[in-house]
Image (cartoon, helix red, strand yellow):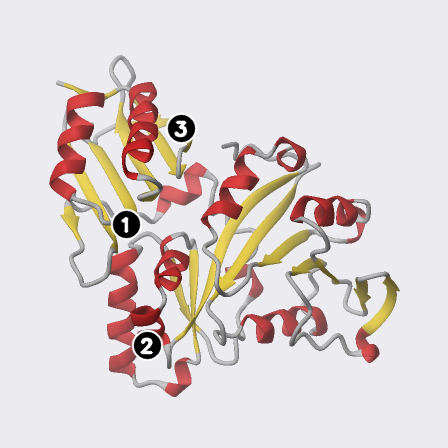
Amino acid sequence: MNSTKNNNELPVTLLTGFLGSGKTTLLNYILKENHGKKIAVIENEFGEMSIDSEFVIGADQDIFEMSNGCICCSIRGDLIETLNRLLEKHQKFDYILIESTGLASSGPTAQAFLIEDEISKTLFLDGIITLVDAKHISSNLNEQEVVWEQIAFSNVILLNKADLVSESEINALEKQIRQINPTCKIHKTTHAVVDLDQILNIGGFDLKTALETVTFNTHHHEGDEAISSVSLSFPGYIDPDRLNLWLQMLLIQEGMNVFRAKGILNIEGSAERYLFQSVYMMFEGRHDKPWGADSPLNKMVFIGQNLDPQRLEKSLKNFAVTE
């Protein structure tokens, strides 16, 4: 995983959300409004997208250039092939936004961006944005596990159709979302109207930014759902190489049960905090600022499926922690 960016790299945003959450409404807004941003929108299929001729100033096969400077295209073949076609026109836009199908988890796509050499040299994953239908999310959560997964991987969640529910319902929904993903930012929206600066160029996978707003409290969010979060805080030293191995062993033993992890670590022999994050088994870490007046302490958040907090903490400490 590499969050180092240079001027030759373009930020990529993954847009997810269950069927009917408002993704198409948001994408139509991006392609038509005069928001001043040049964005390439990649669609799985045009489907409900209305590529109005009045907004199209040029078309090359299934790549449409819009009057506001944005570009829209559909995935033909695989994603990398589509990206390569778009990158030939990279001078015409500043961001890439990829819509994933409403029935898919964003985890595998995110991991592909972090390990795929063909695209990682020219693109970097900036954030995962999930639209949530505030009116119907409760029934969706009960019926579709993928909705929990979409929330679990998110950097930002847009609680859409907020005008159709009461304030108490919104508050209860926010609490439920925090049980799954305590580290994401949440914005309430109506008709998917959002300041694009809240979803673009957010540094969601930049280590420094990703940990700025995280609150680490030792707890496990209980609930009927299988997907939840576990936060740990404990003293001692952690070996980052052994932590990486532990994460990989965990995946081998339990499948893809730990979706994401992030934290601040105390490394023996170093006076600096060590920041880390992972998506499945893709691990990234680096030294940060000195501990200063803060007492060195390991603080970690795990988001995943069927997590047993006691077993998680015990195996982690046995393998990667020294006193």
Left or right: where 239 falls relative to 198: left
Mark 2, residue position: 139
Q: Position of residue 289 (x, y in %)?
A: 36, 28
Q: Amino acid under label 2?
A: Ser
| CA gap, disc 3 and disc 1 | 23 Å
Q: Earlier in the sequence, mark 1 or mark 2?
A: 2
- Closest to the observer, 62 or 236: 62
Residue at mark 3: 285
Tell me if 134 is positioned left or right of 297 in this view.
Answer: right
Q: CA distance from mark 1 to mark 2?
A: 19 Å
Q: Nearer the viewer, mark 3 or mark 1?
A: 1
**Which residue occupies the foreground of this view, 203 or 179?**
179
* Residue 195 picture quarter: bottom right
Looking at the rendered structure, the kind of residue marked 3 is Gly
| Of residues 237 and 176, the one drawn nearer to the viewer in this rendering | 176
- Residue at (64, 61) in percent of width and height: 44
Q: Is residue 7 above or below residue 243?
A: below
Q: Mark 1: which amino acid? A: Gln
Q: Estimate the x, y position of residue 203 in percent, counting from the top left.
A: 50, 46
Instruction: Using the rendered view, name the quadrant where residue 52 is placed.
Output: bottom right
At which x and y percent is residue 50?
71, 77
Label whose residue precedes the other's in the sequence (3 or 1):
3
Q: Nearer the viewer, mark 2 or mark 3?
A: 2
- For mark 1, what is the residue? 305
Tag 3 secondary structure: strand
The residue under the point 15% across, 23% down is 318
